[in-house]
Amino acid sequence: MKDSLVIIGFFIAGILLGFFGLLPESLTGSGITMYALYALIFSVGFSVGNNPGILKEFRRLNPRLALLPVMTILGTVAATALLGLVLPHRTVAETMAVGSGFAYYSLSSVLITEYKGAELGTVALVSNIVREFITLVAAPLLVRWFGTLAAISSGGATTMDVTLPAVVQASGEKYTVLSMYHGFVVDFSVPFLVTFFCSL
């Protein structure tokens, strides 16, 4: 939860700095955001390659449980598509792009900003921070109301790192490997799905 509050603090600080024009023009151009995006994608690949133990543990998963990240992806995309039908001034593709961040706010918001502009990028940032925050705070309630897998699905791409402790505490230690596997697969899908929906 502390990490989410730090991110929100930086987000508010960025708004204030931009609003009052306190940043140099060279930092507000689109070029620096692309380099930040490249660095984020590199760090994702590095973190996966630096932890080969995750890949070994995947083989021990129950084949039925291996479908959980697919169900999380399909459920999120379907729900955001329905949301796009009722929200004014937003297309279905835009809401699906936002939902496809799966709580990976740093990468998805930068991608969406590059493709669709700062307004939708900000929506993506806030909605994905909220998804992570809800998982951190409400994981025990999600497990009680919807079952042991609910907290994992709610965490999206963050279940292999930030929300892992909350998920394991709520669902049980036996779901640690599943949570990491789920986060890895969903995390991997983010850049592909976000860019796909942004290009529609």
Image: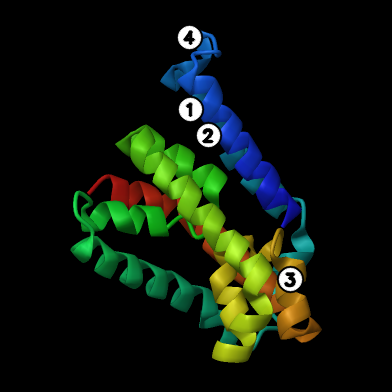
Q: Using the numbered discs, state the Cα–Cα distance from disc 3 to disc 2 in whole angstroms.
A: 28 Å
Q: Using the numbered discs, state the Cα–Cα distance from disc 3 to disc 4 in whole angstroms.
A: 41 Å
The amino acid at mark 2 is Leu
The amino acid at mark 1 is Met
Residue 6, image x, y percentages = 70, 43
- SS of the residue under disc 2: helix
Residue 99, image x, y percentages = 40, 59
Q: Using the numbered discs, state the Cα–Cα distance from disc 4 to disc 1 in whole angstroms.
A: 16 Å
The amino acid at mark 4 is Glu
Circle 3 Cα neighbour tier, 10 Å, few/some/many (<14 / 14–19 / ≥20):
many
* Residue at image mark 2: 37
Assess whether mark 2 and mark 1 are in contact (beta carbons under 8 angstroms).
Answer: yes
What numbered label is drawn on residue 34? 1
- SS of the residue under disc 3: helix
> In the figure, residue 151 lies in which quadrant?
bottom right
The residue lying toward the viewer, choosing from 195 and 11, is 11
* Residue at image mark 3: 166
Residue in the picture at 57% in, 35% down: 12
